Image (spheres, rainbow, N blue to C red):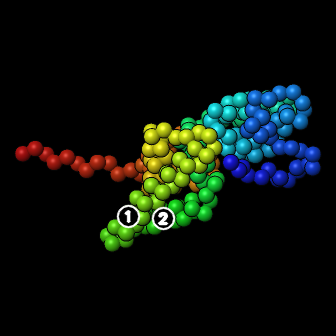
Amino acid sequence: MSTRREDGPGRKDGDRGPVPVGSAGSAGSAEDAPSVGPVESVLDLLYAAPPSDFVSLREQHAGAARSAGRKEDARRLHAARRPTLAAWAANLLTRSLPEESRRFLELGRALREAYRALDADGLKELSAQRRSVVTALSRQAADLAREAGHPLSEGARREVESTLLAVLADPAAAPPWAGCPLTGPPPPPSACPSGRRRSGPPPRARPP
């Protein structure tokens, strides 16, 4: 599984970056100790790691930041929530398939525009695309998770599909497509801070 490069500003030639996922349980030499890099880079690495490694890596890096006197960074790292397996798979999907994720967002925009325009023909065609794309992407997420050694259960795969459907309805429902890692199931689109109020249920007819 690939992670983003961490050769940002201020990186020294000798800086190895945060400890790799495979070194989560190792201890000993200074070379194996977690480095104190930019907190955003460390968070990026944490959410690229499988959920089973998340807590140990988080505490290692939070401890390194605390030892370096970076209390606020240590607090942010310690407060990071471990993602569910389905959320990790959704994050993995956006990392591994950025072009497919971009096209997925474009489909969501087209669907929402068709709803606003009451374009019946466009909705019919786009809805068919939605079904096939969500099925294909959820299958790819399951494949990526299995290749990384963490196969998804049927329930986790359904959660990935729910996440994808939420993104199509409102991109604010799932942070990975906005550059933030997902930690659990996204809220329903009506609960997102998208600037729109959810319309309530239609009034019930009075009984005669």
Q: How far is disc 1 from disc 2 in space, using C-alphas? A: 11 Å
User: Quarter-wise, where is residue 120 in the image?
Assistant: bottom left
Q: Residue furthest top?
A: 28
> Is the C-beta separation of discs 1 and 2 under 8 Å?
no
Q: In this view of the protein, which residue sits in the foreground, 127 or 174?
A: 127
Q: Residue furthest left?
A: 208
Q: Which residue is mark 1?
A: 128
Quarter of the C terminus within the rendering: top left
For label 2, the SS is helix
- With 160 as the anchor, is 62 left or right in this view? right
Of tags 1 and 2, the one toward the viewer is: 1
Up the image or down, 185 lies above or below 94; here it is above
Residue 160: percent from the left, percent from the top? 49, 46
**Residue 49 - label:** none
Q: Residues within 10 Å of mark 1 (few under 14, many from 20)?
A: few
Residue 135: percent from the left, percent from the top? 45, 55
Question: In the image, what residue occupies the spot 10% across and 44% down?
Answer: 207
**Sequence-wise, which precedes: disc 1 or disc 2?**
2
- With 40 as the anchor, is 101 left or right in this view? left
Up the image or down, 188 lies above or below 79; here it is below
**Residue 107 - label:** 2
**Residue 206 can be seen in this image:** yes
- With 148 as the anchor, is 35 left or right in this view? right
- With 21 as the anchor, is 178 left or right in this view? left
Q: Residues within 10 Å of mark 2 (few under 14, many from 20)?
A: some
Amino acid on which the number 2 mark rests in the picture: Leu
Residue 115: percent from the left, percent from the top? 37, 64
Question: In the image, what residue occupies the spot 61% across and 58% down?
Answer: 97
Question: In the image, what residue occupies the spot 83% across and 27% down?
Answer: 27
Question: In the image, what residue occupies the spot 68% across and 48% down?
Answer: 1
Amino acid on which the number 1 mark rests in the picture: Ala
